[in-house]
Image (cartoon, coloured by chain):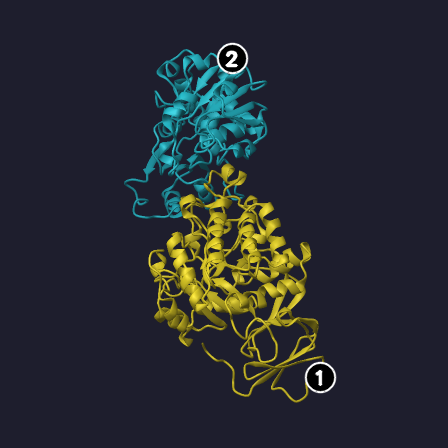
Chain colours: A yellow, B cyan
């Protein structure tokens, strides 16, 4: 990764309200960043000595840099949808200082060489990139990849995302090996034998639209199986990607109660929209997992509040216009999400559902950092990496997809009024977005 | 209906008002393919068929010609669609060629809606995936009204593969708008409980006797093997429980009529005695398709007056 910090440079963030759930801080504080690290955190006006630069954060929230556990930045091979450069620019605009990239590219990131390639400075990343590598060769679900080599080259987890690790024996093997290496296995929980030709959630809406529907059971059954395995296998680390149903959350909760090392994430669209929002065959409402029912949202909100869910992740899935503007059933799955995540979280979870702002910040920071052991990230305790997100939690703004920094504009949130705007994003002590 | 659909488009029954449906049916009664009327004189009707069809295609073609239009048939096989041209590019192409009306049949639900969203000529849905088949519902309504005085107090049983049927969806929407009691009948795999949420006045039953008692119109549907998508249906069991036979039909009202959108599979959803029997209106439906589609096409070009 590129180190953008000039040696000896320092930045003082002054007058803001520090919200750092990982360090249990929620108070007015000044923060001094130096040499790419947090040098000092102190009550207002208590930091002595000169800083090279000052950032006036009066009236703003100062939080650890946001971490996205789930983004498709499409390189290698699908640069027409997104590149590391454009995807990380969008990430910075959304307040994310770190993104974990998904391996379902062309080719699939299933070797140490590709993991290293993703981390090279030539990719032009403006925020930290943490590759997640494929769990099986070419993500075909047959032969495990070389976890040890992938981990050594900088991969933070393995997954076959886009599809599940379906075979019991392969999933067991992955969790055993992952357990030995302390390496999380990320599951895309979908029993694809039950979702053939499906393009949305199974319910009244899918029946009305004549679209085949994915049942909640297709997700929950895989989560049940995986949690069961994680409870049996010593040290196994299971992370369930984009949980979308109440039933799947029950499985996660069961694993957590049994003290298994099970974590999970939820996307902003799954706590914001339901299958009833799918209309006019607009494929910007088509993603996998699909938009679920209102009662699933209720369960997700409870799970976000009570700690069952560890992180809000975007599942940012850019696609070119021609891959979306077609028959709904044939259109690509997925929507962009890096720039709308915070605004949706505050508007929907905080303003509407009364989840405390500190909990929301935790879901973007300490929560995800714990899922993949991103050391020195997710908190601004002294000595941490100087990744900071500064935002205005009260600011209402309208998202204009045309102005998105992502290469693709496939989003259902174009024109939405959101609340909570990123004012500055700081990576390793350097302001990368303002 | 997409906001951008051109005036005169017919994408589905769901969002069509009852008054508009009656207007179409009334106008259809004035249409006669043997007495051509030049309402579409000089117009070009593009028939874009991505899926096999006998009835609907020939019926739209005859209807268009009876109104003086030129018709061009584009089928997936033997066109650029086979070479991978996208739906919209095909749409832009036929528009550029000079299409005044596009009639489209497509295996994917919503394909006509995507087309209508981007193309500035009326789009007529001739069947989209499992979604809707509005011209069929209109010709069925036309047929019902020729056999029954009005929709008032009617009970209609739709028996068979509701899940895979765009005909059932369109018919349910249409009949519901006129207060008709609708009973959907078949096994769980083909008639999910959720089907009752489609429109007001719909009830689901697993028992054919229950469906037929007091019924004025029996609509039969084919088990669509090509759309089952891995679903296993026990055909002998289906036949035993749901096949329409003379003995079963006696459970319906004396003057009940039997309808079927076709193609029929004799020996499966119905016996030959039913298909060819006195109560069958299956061929009348096919005949009624032409004047109904004449009305739909006249409406498309703003000549339904």
Q: Nearer the viewer, residue B253 or B42?
A: B253
Q: Nearer the viewer, residue B169 or A129?
A: A129
Give the answer, above or below, for where B258 lies relative to A198.
above
Query: In the visual, does B272 lie left or right of A295?
Result: left
Mark 2 chain: B
Residue at the outermost left position: B78
Task: Tell me whether marks 1 and 2 sit on the same chain.
Answer: no
Mark 1 chain: A
Query: In the visual, does A428 lie left or right of B89?
Result: right
The residue carrying mark 2 is: B253
Which quarter of the figure has residue A108? Answer: bottom left
Which quarter of the figure has residue B66? Answer: top left
* Residue A230 position within the rendered picture, expressed as x and y whole percent measured from the top left: 48, 58
Q: Please report the residue visible at 50 percent of the width from the left and 10 percent of the height from the top.
A: B254
Give the answer, above or below, for where A124 lies relative to A231.
below
Which quarter of the figure has residue B270? Answer: top left
* Residue B58 position within the rendered picture, expressed as x and y whole percent measured from the top left: 35, 28
Q: Is residue A403 visible?
A: yes
- Mark nearer the viewer, 1 or 2: 1
* Residue B290 position within the rendered picture, expressed as x and y whole percent measured from the top left: 41, 24
The answer to whether marks 1 and 2 mark residues whose Cβ atoms lie closer than 8 Å is no
Query: In the visual, does A294 lie left or right of B283?
Result: right
Residue at the outermost bottom position: A49
Q: Nearer the viewer, residue B140 or A57?
A: A57
Q: Count up the numbered dots.
A: 2
Spatial CA span between label 1 and label 2: 91 Å
Q: Which mark is residue A46?
A: 1
Secondary structure found at label 2: loop
Secondary structure found at label 1: loop
Q: Crowding at label 1, few (<14), some or many (≥20) Cα neighbours within 10 Å?
A: few
Position of the C terminus of chain A, as image quadrant, is bottom right
Q: Please report the residue visible at 34 percent of the width from the left and 28 percent of the height from the top.
A: B54
């Amino acid at each position: 990764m590129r180190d953008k910090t000039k040696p000896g440079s320092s930045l003082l963030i002054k007058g803001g309200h520090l919200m750092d759930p990982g360090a249990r801080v929620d108070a007015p504080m000044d923060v001094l960043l130096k040499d790419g690290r947090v040098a000092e955190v102190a009550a207002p006006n208590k930091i002595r000595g000169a800083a090279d630069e000052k950032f006036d954060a009066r009236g703003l929230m100062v939080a650890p840099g946001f971490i996205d556990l789930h983004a498709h930045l499409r390189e290698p091979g699908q640069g027409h949808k997104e590149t590391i450069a454009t995807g990380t620019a969008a990430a910075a605009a959304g307040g994310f200082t770190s993104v974990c990239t998904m391996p379902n590219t062309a080719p699939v990131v299933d070797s140490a060489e590709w993991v290293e390639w993703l981390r090279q400075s030539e990719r032009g990343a403006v925020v930290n990139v943490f590759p997640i590598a494929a769990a099986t060769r070419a993500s075909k679900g047959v032969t495990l990849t070389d976890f040890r080599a992938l981990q050594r080259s900088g991969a933070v987890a393995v997954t076959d995302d886009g599809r599940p690790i379906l075979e019991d024996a392969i999933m067991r093997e992955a969790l055993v090996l992952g357990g030995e290496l302390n390496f999380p296995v990320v599951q895309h929980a979908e029993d694809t034998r039950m979702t053939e030709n499906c393009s949305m959630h199974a319910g009244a809406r899918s029946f009305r639209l004549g679209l085949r529907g994915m049942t909640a059971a297709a997700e929950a059954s895989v989560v049940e199986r995986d949690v069961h395995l994680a409870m049996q296998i010593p040290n196994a680390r299971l992370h369930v990607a984009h949980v979308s149903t109440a039933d799947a959350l029950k499985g996660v909760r069961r694993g957590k109660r049994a003290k298994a090392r099970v974590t999970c994430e939820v996307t902003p669209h799954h706590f914001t929209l339901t299958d009833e929002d799918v209309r006019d065959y607009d494929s910007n409402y088509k993603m996998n997992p699909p938009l679920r029912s209102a009662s699933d949202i209720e369960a997700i909100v409870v799970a976000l509040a009570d700690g069952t869910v560890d992180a809000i992740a975007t599942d940012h899935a850019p696609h070119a216009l021609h891959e979306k503007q077609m028959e709904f059933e044939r259109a690509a799955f997925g929507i962009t999400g890096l720039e709308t995540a915070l605004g949706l979280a505050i508007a929907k979870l905080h303003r509407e559902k009364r989840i405390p702002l500190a909990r929301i910040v935790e879901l973007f920071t300490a929560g995800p950092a714990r899922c993949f052991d991103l050391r020195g990230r997710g908190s601004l305790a002294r000595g941490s990496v100087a990744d900071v997100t500064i935002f205005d939690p009260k600011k209402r703004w309208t998202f204009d997809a045309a102005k998105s920094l992502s290469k693709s504009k496939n989003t259902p949130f174009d024109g939405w009024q959101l609340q909570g705007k990123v004012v500055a994003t700081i990576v390793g002590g350097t302001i990368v977005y303002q | 209906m997409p906001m951008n659909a051109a005036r005169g488009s017919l994408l589905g029954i769901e969002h069509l008002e009852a008054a508009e449906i009656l207007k179409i049916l009334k106008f259809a009664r004035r249409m006669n393919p043997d007495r051509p009327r030049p309402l579409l004189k000089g117009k070009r009707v593009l028939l874009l068929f991505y899926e096999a069809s006998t009835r609907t295609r020939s019926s739209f073609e005859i209807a268009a010609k009876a109104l003086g239009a030129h018709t061009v048939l584009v089928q997936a096989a033997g066109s650029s669609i086979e070479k991978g041209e996208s739906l919209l590019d095909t749409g832009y192409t036929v528009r550029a060629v000079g299409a005044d009306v596009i009639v489209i049949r497509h295996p994917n639900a919503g394909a006509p809606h995507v087309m209508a969203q981007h193309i500035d000529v009326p789009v007529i849905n001739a069947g989209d995936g499992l979604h809707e088949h509005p011209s069929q519902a209109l010709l069925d309504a036309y047929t019902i009204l020729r056999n029954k005085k009005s929709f008032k107090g009617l009970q209609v049983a739709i028996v068979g593969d509701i899940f895979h049927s765009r005909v059932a969806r369109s018919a349910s929407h249409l009949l519901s708008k006129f207060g008709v009691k609708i009973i959907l009948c078949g096994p769980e795999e083909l008639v999910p409980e959720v089907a009752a949420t489609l429109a007001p006045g719909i009830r689901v039953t697993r028992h054919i006797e229950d469906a037929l008692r007091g019924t004025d119109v029996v609509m039969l549907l084919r088990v669509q093997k090509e759309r089952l998508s891995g679903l296993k249906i026990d055909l002998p069991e289906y036949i035993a429980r749901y096949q329409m036979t003379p003995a079963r039909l006696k459970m319906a009202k004396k003057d009940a009529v039997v309808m079927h959108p076709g193609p029929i599979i004799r020996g499966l959803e119905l016996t030959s005695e039913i298909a060819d029997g006195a109560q069958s209106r299956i061929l009348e439906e096919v005949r009624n398709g032409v004047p109904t589609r004449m009305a739909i096409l006249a409406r498309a070009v703003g000549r339904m007056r």
